Image (spheres, grey):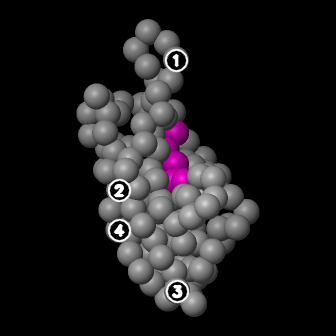
């Protein structure tokens, strides 16, 4: 069974930086893609960045140029580097692995989330 655990959240001031990490355990061979999502109070969870097996990346418009998603070679770790943070980046950041399911289909595995708070 695959589990993912986030770390690295915290409180920073506007303009600061944070590096989030996500560690996956279990059978994570050949994930389809990995992503970071976030949810601000009162808002729906939104996709922040995604990285596909093979290295292609996607960023939501609001973080382009400020965020970098990456993985290790084994794809058991996913990182999100966020720079020039803004108060609107505040929220709980969730790591997600999308993996093929034995016998067909896919599974989305979510972590518990890590809080990021950006103060003005």
Q: Which residue is mark 2?
A: 6
Discs 4, 2 touching: Cβ within 8 Å: yes
- What's the distance in space between the residues labelled 4 and 3, CA to CA? 17 Å
Which image quadrant: the C terminus?
Answer: bottom right
Quarter location, residue 64:
bottom right
Q: Position of residue 111 (x, y in %)?
A: 38, 47
- What's the distance in space between the residues labelled 1 and 4, CA to CA? 31 Å
Residue at image x 54%, y 72%?
A: 90
* SS for dot 3: strand
Residue at image x 45%, y 84%?
A: 12
Q: Position of residue 89 (x, y in %)?
A: 58, 72
- What's the distance in space between the residues labelled 2 and 1, CA to CA? 25 Å
Q: Position of residue 97 (x, y in %)?
A: 45, 40
Q: Which mark is residue 8?
A: 4
The answer to whether residue 64 is seen in the rendering is yes
Task: For label 4, count other residues whose C-alpha is less than 10 Å away and answer few (under 14), some (14-19) or many (20+).
Answer: some
**In the figure, 102 relative to 27: above or below?**
above
Task: For label 2, count other residues whose C-alpha is less than 10 Å away and answer few (under 14), some (14-19) or many (20+).
Answer: many
Relative to 13, 64 lies left or right: right
Q: Which dot, 4 or 3, sits closer to the camera?
A: 3
Q: Which residue is mark 3?
A: 119
Q: Which dot, 1 or 3, sits closer to the camera?
A: 3
The stretch in magenta equals 33-37
Q: Which mark is residue 105?
A: 1
Along the line of sight, the residue nearer the viewer: 36 or 30: 36
* SS for dot 2: strand
Task: For label 1, count other residues whose C-alpha is less than 10 Å away and answer few (under 14), some (14-19) or many (20+).
Answer: few
Q: Earlier in the sequence, mark 1 or mark 3?
A: 1
- What's the distance in space between the residues labelled 4 and 2, CA to CA? 7 Å
Q: Earlier in the sequence, mark 2 or mark 3?
A: 2
* SS for dot 4: loop
Discs 4, 3 touching: Cβ within 8 Å: no
């Amino acid at each position: 069974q695959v589990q993912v655990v986030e770390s690295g959240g915290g409180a920073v001031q506007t303009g600061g930086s944070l590096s989030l990490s996500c560690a996956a355990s279990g059978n994570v061979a050949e994930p389809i893609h990995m992503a970071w999502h976030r949810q601000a109070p009162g808002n729906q969870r939104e996709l922040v960045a995604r990285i596909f097996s093979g290295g292609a990346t996607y960023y939501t418009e609001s973080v382009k140029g400020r965020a970098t998603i990456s993985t290790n070679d084994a794809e058991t770790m996913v990182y999100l580097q966020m720079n020039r943070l803004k108060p609107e980046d505040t929220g709980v950041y969730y790591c997600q692995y999308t993996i093929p399911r034995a016998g067909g289909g896919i599974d989305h595995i979510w972590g518990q989330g890590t809080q990021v708070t950006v103060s003005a």
